Image: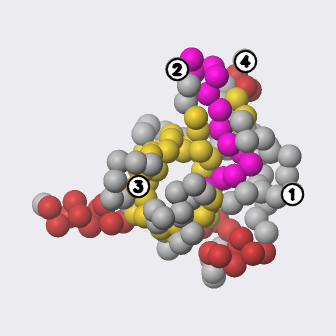
């Protein structure tokens, strides 16, 4: 049983070669669902309780979200097809939920096959750092 749990945990480890900005020394994170729909996720340091981020699938929230990766960004992931890349955005959940925001300017991109990840700053876009999570719902 413990061996199976350990194997399952290893399968969920996402590796950031460069770390996440502000947390460069932490390379491995656990990624797991927080809801049944697969929209809300938790990204937590694999060997510590800190840092831990709420990350969200942006596409159900921002219908026209279309981040463009540079050739350098794509090279980081090596030989992979674009459909193997999962895009998540970091959320800041506020006590008053209507004030919660997501960062569309710096998505986290994950190769679902290799589990290699990187937070990418979209240089040539007008996506905001603080996009109201419930903006389109109001």
Q: Secondary structure at mark 4?
A: loop
- Judge depth for marks 3 and 4 and give the one in front: 3
Q: Nearer the viewer, mark 4 or mark 2?
A: 2
On screen, 62 above or below 133? below
The reply to whether discs 4 and 2 touch (Cβ–Cβ < 8 Å) is no
Looking at the picture, does residue 114 appear above or below residue 89? Answer: below
Q: Nearer the viewer, residue 58 or 107?
A: 107
Number of residues whose C-alpha sits closer than 10 Å to that of mark 4, classed few (under 14), some (14–19) or many (20 or more): few
Residue bearing the label numbered 2: 95
- Of tags 1 and 3, the one toward the viewer is 3
Q: Position of residue 44 (x, y in %)?
A: 42, 51
Relative placement, left or right, of 57 versus 120 is left
In the image, which residues are magenta?
Answer: 96-109
Query: Which residue is depicted at the point 86% across and 57% down?
Result: 124
Mark 2 crowd level (few <14, some 14–19, many ≥20, 10 Å Cα): few
Residue that appears at 53% across and 72% down: 17
Which residue position is annotated with label 3?
Answer: 45
Where's residue 21, x and y in %?
60, 57
Residue where numbered disc 1 is placed = 124
Residue 62, compared with residue 99, is above or below; it is: below
Q: Which residue is mark 4?
A: 138
């Amino acid at each position: 049983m413990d061996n199976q749990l350990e194997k399952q945990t290893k399968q969920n480890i996402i590796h950031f070669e460069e770390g996440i900005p502000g947390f460069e020394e932490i390379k491995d994170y656990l990624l797991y669902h927080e809801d049944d729909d697969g929209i809300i996720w938790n990204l937590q340091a694999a060997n510590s309780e800190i840092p831990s981020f709420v990350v969200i699938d942006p596409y159900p929230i921002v219908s026209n979200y279309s981040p463009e990766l540079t050739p350098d960004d794509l090279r980081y992931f090596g030989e992979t097809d674009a459909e193997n890349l999962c895009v998540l955005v970091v959320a800041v959940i506020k006590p008053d939920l209507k004030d919660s925001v997501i960062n569309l300017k710096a998505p986290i991109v994950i190769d679902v096959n290799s589990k290699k990840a990187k937070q990418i700053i979209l240089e040539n876009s007008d996506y905001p750092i603080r996009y109201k999570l419930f903006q389109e719902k109001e």
